[in-house]
Structures are given as structure tokens and as C-alpha cells.
Image (tube, grey):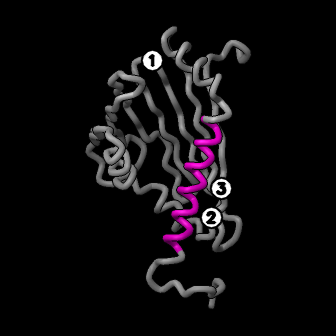
Amino acid sequence: RQGRRSGMDFDTKADIEAPLAWVFKQATDFAAFERQAMRRGADVQRVDRLDHPGPGSAWDVQFRFRGRDRLVNVRLTRFDPPHGYDVDMDSANLHGTMQVELVALSRVRTRLAVRLALDAHSLQARILLQSLRLARGQIARRFDTRMAAFALDLQNRYARRPGATAGARPGE
């Protein structure tokens, strides 16, 4: 059945000069992600009643794509501090999963790995994914570029945080 799969996967990773716990805290700042999506024109509504992020945290995200309004239900399905989390995304025609994994490479260096998988629920979605496959290289480069920019932003914010000293090595 693997050969008949109608989905697409994207994987990327980036190394960040910051400790694992700090990177996890930044990578789970879902309120910041909500604001970022809204700045890009999406309507984001938190639909759970949890006080803190965890399995069951959920959002409805509405946006315009290819001339049509889309609604995606986003749910946090795994939350494993400080190692990562999983997100499920469902729309009328597509299902997606995103796995975010964090690994400490040293006390002050963390690897961020993200895997995004999309699967079609309908013929319309299979056609959409087929058109995306034709541009797969460009989409993968854009995904890699966005993740690298996110990682660099985290690294820069860590270096600029209060108490950080320029050029100091860890422990100094």
C-alpha cells in the first residue's frame, strides 16, 4: 500500500546555539505562532480550555489559499518537554501531521528536526498534492529556508537575552 500513498512528506533540521530547554520553550510559544499567522491574514481561534499547552490544545485556523477560504483544525497530540511535540491538522480534504523533535547536541547546542506529512482525503486534494509534487523542490527549499530562518532567529534571541555576554563561552 505504501506505493499507492497519495501524500507528501517534508523533513528539515537545523542546529541552534542555545540550550535544549530554552529552545523548547521558544518552539512551544503557540501564542506567538497565532500572532504570526494572523499577521499573514489567517483567522486563528483557540478552541480548547487548557491553561497550558498539552495534548488536547486545539485551534481553528481559517485562511485564503488558491482563491478559496480554507479551514484547518489543528490539535496538539503529543507534548513531551523538552524533547518535542506532534500536531495533527485536518481540513475537509487534507490531513497533516507535524513532528517537532529537539535533541541536545551539547549543553548549549540543540538540533531542531521537523517532519511534515500531508495526506489527501479526496480526489480534489490528490490533485492539489499532485500539483504540489510538481513544485516539490521549490516547496522543500522554501520549507528549509523558513525553518533555517526560525532557527537563526531563536539563536539570535538567545544571544541577545538579558545576561548574555558577547563572545563568552558557556560557563563563563
Task: From the viewer's side, name the closer residue of 94 and 143.
Answer: 143
Q: Where is residue 71 in the image (x, y as percent from the top left)?
A: 34, 27
Amino acid type, label 2: Ile
Mark 2: few/some/many CA within 10 Å (<14, 14-19, 20+):
many
Amino acid type, label 1: Asn
C-alpha distance separating marks 2 and 1? 35 Å
Residue at 31%, 45% (x, y): give it.
38
In primary-sequence order, the first of circles 1 and 3 is 3
The quarter holding residue 107 reads bottom right
Amino acid type, label 3: Ala
Q: Image quadrant for the C terminus?
A: bottom right
Q: What stretch is highlighted in magenta?
A: 139-158
Asked if disc 2 and disc 3 are in contact, CB closer than 8 Å, the reply is: yes
With 171 as the anchor, is 85 left or right in this view? left
Q: Which residue lies furthest to the bottom in this view?
A: 172
Q: Give the SS element for disc 3.
A: strand
Q: Where is residue 45 in the image (x, y as percent from the top left)?
A: 27, 40
**Chief SS of the magenta region:** helix
The answer to whether residue 135 is above or below residue 165 is: above
With 84 as the anchor, is 141 left or right in this view? right
Name the residue that disc number 1 marks. 93
Residue 16's disc number: 2
Q: Give the SS element for disc 1.
A: loop
In primary-sequence order, the first of circles 2 and 1 is 2
C-alpha distance separating marks 2 and 3? 6 Å
